[in-house]
Image: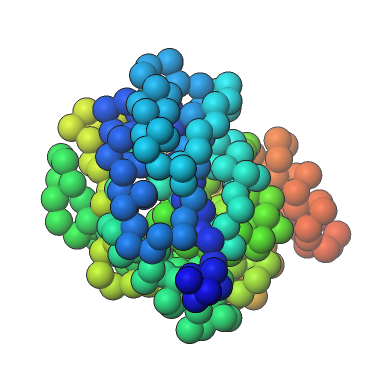
Amino acid sequence: MFKDLKKPLVTIVIPCYNSERTIVDAVTSALSQDYAKIEVIVVDDGSTDNSGQLIKNIMNDDPRLSYCYQENKGVSAARNRGLNLAKGRYISFLDGDDKLKSSYISLGLEVFESNPTLTLVYSNMELFEREKGLYPLPKFNVGHFLRSNCIPIFALVRTEQLRTIKGFDESISLCEDWECWVHLLKVFNTNVYRIEEPQYYYRRRFTNDSNMDQNMGNDEKLKEILLYIFSKHQKIYFDNDMGLSKLFQIQDEFRRFKIKYYNRWYKRVFYKLFKPSKHREIYMNSER
């Protein structure tokens, strides 16, 4: 009994928006962890279907589950609401149409407890529904990671560290998890660990309407996000010898994007973060 009291509480946050078809599976997988000391918080982001009632039905049978409703603000706002409510020492995020393997939290905690310098723990993941098999997730390398995300949303992190960086950036609606992890690794350290056995089941929907499906191949939007992340978190890029020229191999493409966004957020952010001489250099180049 006393040994159990010493175990840390872990929070699993599940954002939900019109997920009545899948939310029960997601919640059940979270509550079925073989690590018992958990709390599961479902943040209903303004659903208009029967999602809320389905969650409340499960609450009657398991006090570890709680439900919070808010007006629709987007997935980052829903995750941040869950972060604010979390009581756990560690926290993980599960999308409302995906599932966790029962051993994920226990394995993740074992890794964390054996290596206190780690900032983040995650695992490989498997596809289900429209596609099956192992998701082709590249191994973590900080240089590759800063160009393209390889850490899924369900990563296990320390709650207080995530609160320190104020959670997810609510101003973006794509790659918000990537931006969050870049921020976290910049402020703390780039020590991460991947559990090789898949612990997460990622649903590839038959309907092709997921955020990933809709933005597949949208290179321009992804480059816009990359510029935003770079401008916001330059330190970690420069610390790893990654300037803009290494992010975009074709200089003409970079110049086109730089000019397009310079007068909106780019100028303001770079003015604050660059040395004045460097800012003048970039500003003059963008005018050519």
From the viewer's perspective, tell me whether residue 186 is left or right of residue 250: right
Q: How is the image coloured?
A: rainbow
Q: Return the x and y of residue 16 as percentages of the image width and height.
A: 43, 32
Q: Residue furthest bottom?
A: 114
Asked if residue 146 shows in the view, the reply is no
Q: Residue furthest front?
A: 1
**Rendering quarter of residue 207:** top left
Q: Return the x and y of residue 259 as percentages of the image width and height.
A: 63, 41
Q: Residue furthest top?
A: 48
For the point 31% across and 44% down, which residue is it? 28
Number of numbered discs on residues: 0
Q: 164 or 270, which lies in front?
A: 164
Q: 163 or 103, which lies in front?
A: 103
For the point 46% across and 43% down, which residue is it? 63
From the viewer's perspective, tell me whether residue 186 is left or right of residue 219: right
Asked if residue 273 shows in the view, the reply is yes
Q: 255 or 65, which lies in front?
A: 65
Q: Return the x and y of residue 248 as percentages of the image width and height.
A: 49, 58
* Relative vertical location of residue 184 with respect to residue 67 in this rendering, above or below: below
From the viewer's perspective, tell me whether residue 23 is left or right of residue 71: left
For the point 72% across and 37% down, which residue is it? 263
* Relative vertical location of residue 29 with respect to residue 121 in this rendering, above or below: above
Q: Return the x and y of residue 214 as percentages of the image width and height.
A: 34, 33
For the point 45% across and 21% down, which residue is it? 47
